[in-house]
Amino acid sequence: MSQHGKDPNFNAQITLRKQLVMVGIVLGIAIGSLGSLAFVIWSDGDRSKSTLSDSIAANQEPNATRETTVQNELSPELSKLSKVDSMIEIVSEFDRLSTEQMAALAQQTTNLEPRSKRSTIQTLLIGELSRRDPKHALEQVWKMPRSQWTELVPVVFSEWSLINIEDSFATSMELHAALRETAIRSLLNTRTELSNNRWLTLAAEHDFEESILTLLREREAIALLDSPLDAFQLVIQDDVDDQLQRDLIQKIARTMVQQNGYESFDPLIEYSIWWFSDLLLEEAESNPIEFFSVIKSLPTESRNSVIYPLVKAWVPLDPSTAYESISSLEEFKDKFYYHNIFRIWAEVDLEGLFTRVESFPRSERAWAAYSALLELVKKSPEEALNRTFDYESIVGVDVLDLQESLISEWAASDPKAAVNWVTANTTEDTWDQAWLLWMGLREFVKIDPEAALEFALSQAPESVYVERGFADRVIDDVVDGGELELAMAALDRLPENARIDSFTSVGTALALEHRWQEVVELIEGFSDEEQVRYFNTVTYFAMRDDLFKLLETVPKLPSEKARRLVAQGMLRNHERYGGSLTTDQVNYLQQFVDQNDDSNENHLN
């Protein structure tokens, strides 16, 4: 902002004056909105409304003679201004006046008629004076009739806030309640770019947080009346995220719908749909068919965010009609809308969905069957699994996939019953049975690892379950569940084709606990080929866990063979996956591959 005195740059000055004129216009509009408060605020005109104004009034007398002289000199100037209709021309006259002359001229305007002319000239004079010296401008306001304060206080504080928001806010705090709020409203309306947090910080210095929050909410309410969309944008940008903000967003969105109907959703959906999902749900429930017709007319990229509230509201009311309508959208399959439709359909009309599965397009049948069965398994898991066999002849539905999902769901609460169903209702010694047993045992291990392991080890040696090596997967799950000692105790009972993988799982867990003596002892008696495979895997995970710890461990291993195998495993992993070892580390490990026990006393620096 420019300070007192003429700006030598004429073009810049004209621009500045135009800005002032615009401020005057805006203030005129703002003042009008406060007119209804004037009678209440100023009805007790004999009482001072400002501690600051009282102090200034007490010191006016010494300067009275000088002011009177200046005012008399400026009488022709005021007469001239009163005949000018253009505010730009009025403002241009101010360039010739000093601050003292402008202050005197402002005092002469108090009795100017008509009132509209007086208001315009006063506003422009006090505005210009405020831009030069806001404190001096405020002193001039207090010299004017109290009935005019309500118009001029906002002018001073609006311009002052642009110069120094901290000083203007602090000065407003010296005013009595009614004038204080008038001044603060002016600050809020002028410095709209400041966040709520900034205003609350300013208010905290003066114990004014509660009042400023009320005024901020008042401002939001006024914006809501004038332009709901602008108000919506204003509120979502607010950095005070609380329940009030969420309530305002809901109210604003409702106002927009009341004013403009469903067309309001077009601009609203540019923002997060979760701000007003409840509103969408209410509208969809009240008239889903009409709501859908509006959504259908939206751009494809915009529909995705509003489809779910429609599905949530419409499917419980009429699942078949909702499906037929929504499936007509071109993006229906790409967006997998049918996932939510079938899920909710199963909740409200389970048998109805069961009877419709085969009528759906082939790509949707599996999900329809899955949704229905998943809902049924919550109530009667055995019945749900038995009904999977009804879909064996339906194209597009894989019964094994359905059973896999249901077994996992059932086993999470009753694993023993789930695996018993598998053994009793699937063909013995088949891949399907072996796979479903493993799916059930995965959940069984989480609840009762010892019982799950016992069940896995009790399978006949000639079974497909054992043949395909599923037993080692149970060992993996037991180890992953933190039951390392239980897994170690079961190693000697494993079928032959599960031994090396199970031992490797246990050995890796031991290595991660730095129990290398046991890592080495665990694999004794296995073939050289199996030991190489074992150490390749164990060292891979140990290197990822703590490379330097492993490097320090190598020379401490109990035998030359163990040191060589671990070093070889580390080098192979480095060659296969790259980048894990430095050149010095590679050379260091190579010693254990090339040399005897006697040469392995070097340590990595």
Image: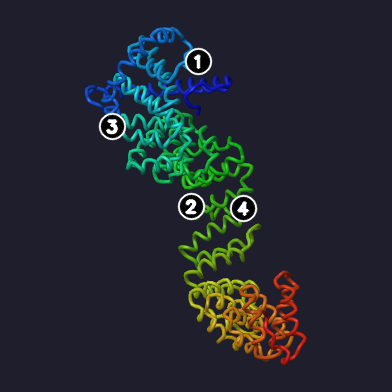
User: In what element is the residue under mark 1?
Assistant: helix
Q: Is residue 257 visible?
A: no
CA–CA distance between discs 3 and 2?
Answer: 66 Å
Q: Is residue 230 visible?
A: yes
Q: Which residue is mark 4?
A: 364
Query: In front: mark 1 or mark 3?
Result: 1
CA–CA distance between discs 1 and 4?
Answer: 75 Å
Amino acid type indicated by mark 3:
His
Amino acid type indicated by mark 4:
Glu
Query: In front: mark 2 or mark 1?
Result: 1
Task: Please tell me which residue lies in front, 55 or 189.
Answer: 55
Residue drawn where x is 22% and y is 23% of the image? 44
Asked if labels 4 and 2 touch by Cβ distance under 8 angstroms, the answer is no
Q: Give residue 92's mark.
A: 1
Compared across the picture, whether 27 is left or right of 599 comes to: left
Q: Is residue 500 above or below residue 238?
A: below
Task: Please tell me which residue lies in front, 273 or 216.
Answer: 216
Asked if labels 2 and 3 touch by Cβ distance under 8 angstroms, the answer is no
Compared across the picture, whether 474 is left or right of 255 comes to: right
Q: Which residue is mark 2?
A: 349
Amino acid type indicated by mark 1:
Ser
Compared across the picture, whether 232 is left or right of 573 comes to: left
N-terminal of the pair, mark 1 or mark 3, is 1
Q: Give residue 176's mark.
A: 3
Residue 73: image x %, image y %? 38, 10
Q: Is residue 172 above or below residue 385?
A: above
User: In what element is the residue under mark 2?
Assistant: loop
User: In what element is the residue under mark 3?
Assistant: loop
